[in-house]
Amino acid sequence: HDIVHRYEIDCEWVESGSVEASIHSIEEEQGENENAEGSDKTAFLSAEQVNEIMGIPEKNCKNLYQGGEYDPGCAGVNPLELTLGLADAAESLGVKIFEYTKAARIERNRDDNDATAATEYVPPKGRFNLVTTEGQVVRCDHVVLCTGAENISNKLSRRLAYSFVPIYTWMAATAELREECPLKDGVVDSVIAKNLTGSANSAKTSGHEADSLTKKPAPMCGDDHVSLNYWRRTPTLVQKKFKRNEDNEGRILFGSLADTYPFPKWLISWRLRYALTEVYPQLRDVKFDHVWGGKLAFPLNSMPLIGRDTDYDDNTQEDIDGMNKYSGGGVWYATGFAGHGIVPTAMAGSVLANAILGIPDYSLDEINNVSHHQRWQLFHEYFPPSPWNGSPVSRAGAGSLLLVYNLWDWLGKRGVPLPPLPKLW
């Protein structure tokens, strides 16, 4: 939020909060424990409250969601506008961005005594030569690999080449629903207010005061299918900082599915519609105006990969105060965000920037009490890249595992008693 505010990025920032619904039976004790670990504003919701907030018809309430939680501290953005705004902010600070430039390999720079004509421009030497597929060379001291789920060759990083599995996910934008959109502004306020005044029976909240409630926009929504569903309403006119149109479309942006191979768009559309109408049967005949998707990088432990590729390190780096050892140059990485990229990538950018500049992430008082002076070292040590992802059968193996978990969800929703499976993410 600080970055968006500082650089005045128009990314349709809406502090709407979020509702996470569960298709599994929620024990009262488990709900209390989970709520205690969250922020003091997180509210545990009954099945009835989840359905009321989400606008799910009463005839469908008893079948799908068994409960959930509401977190008022979440905000939604337009990811494309955020990305473009960040690019504009970077360029305003002197950064040069070269789109559609693919890196082929990283080479250590070697000093040589080749004679060079006096009139020829010689770029300043860095520790590394980053060579593109077109044969161009970027000379630099630091390289940060921030690729998504595209394959990373061994010539770029042997540590990352087999560290994750690509998973496809998809989204659809419905036609304009306007007043028929099931997600409404202010419904969360109403549900929470009922609980505070004692008219609700099962929600438990803390940190809320009835007189401090404000009219919240319709929340973002999601559930805990292994191929999780996630959706939100398009922002209304009054929620946009810069008004691009004078219309409140009221579309639903609905995402779902987890596949290890791409499928035809007609099949994707059919599966998305099935998932949408399972939640909202009344939207069965609503048209999809847009369908899109792509690959996500999923590490085997579903944790972001943030760290330093020590294969490119040498013994010439000096350790200054035990902290600036790595600021002289190196190859870094930040990838494998498994679909949760907006918040963790902003964090990763800050963490790696501090590492490159040699800035500690802790205060002087804290440094004496921590074993690592910079946070990237925690990720590097405790969540390193996997040396092998199961290649060449990684996609088939991950697809088979997802098939079993999806079958488990399908049977569980139909009342078949099954033991819980370990969580994938």
Image: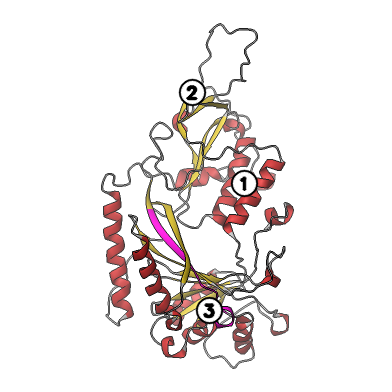
Look at 63% across and 79% down and name the residue there: 185
Residues 335 and 273: in front is 273
User: Tag on residue 350?
Assistant: 1
Residue 214 image point, x, y percent = 70, 79
Q: Is residue 87 above or below residue 405?
A: above
Residue 168, magenta (yes or no): yes
Residues 404 and 44: in front is 404
Inter-mark Cα distance, 3 to 2: 54 Å
Asked whether the residues under the numbered discs 1 and 2 touch, taking CB atoms below 8 Å apart as contact, a structural biologist would say no
Residue 118 image point, x, y percent = 64, 7
Which image quadrant: the N terminus?
A: bottom right
Q: Amino acid at mark 3?
A: Phe
User: Tag on residue 375?
Assistant: none
Residue 308, magenta (yes or no): no
Look at 42% across and 90% down and name the residue there: 59
Residues 75 and 203: in front is 75
Q: Is residue 327 above or below residue 177?
A: above
Q: Given this view, does label 1 or label 3 mark the residue nearer the observer?
A: 1
Q: Amino acid at mark 2?
A: Arg
Look at 62% across and 68% down and name the residue there: 73
For the magenta stretch, what is the residue range? 167-183
Q: Quick one: label 2, few (<14), some, or many (20+) residues within 10 Å?
A: some
Question: Would you say 384 lies left or right of 347 here?
Answer: left
Q: Total number of numbered labels?
A: 3
Query: Which residue lies under the disc numbered 2?
Result: 108
Residues 371 and 215: in front is 215
Q: Amino acid at mark 1?
A: Ser
Q: Given this view, does label 1 or label 2 mark the residue nearer the observer?
A: 2
Of the two numbered discs 3 and 2 on the same chain, state the one appearing first in sequence. 3
Query: Which residue lies under the disc numbered 3?
Result: 44
Question: Would you say 165 lies left or right of 97 here?
Answer: left
Inter-mark Cα distance, 1 to 2: 26 Å
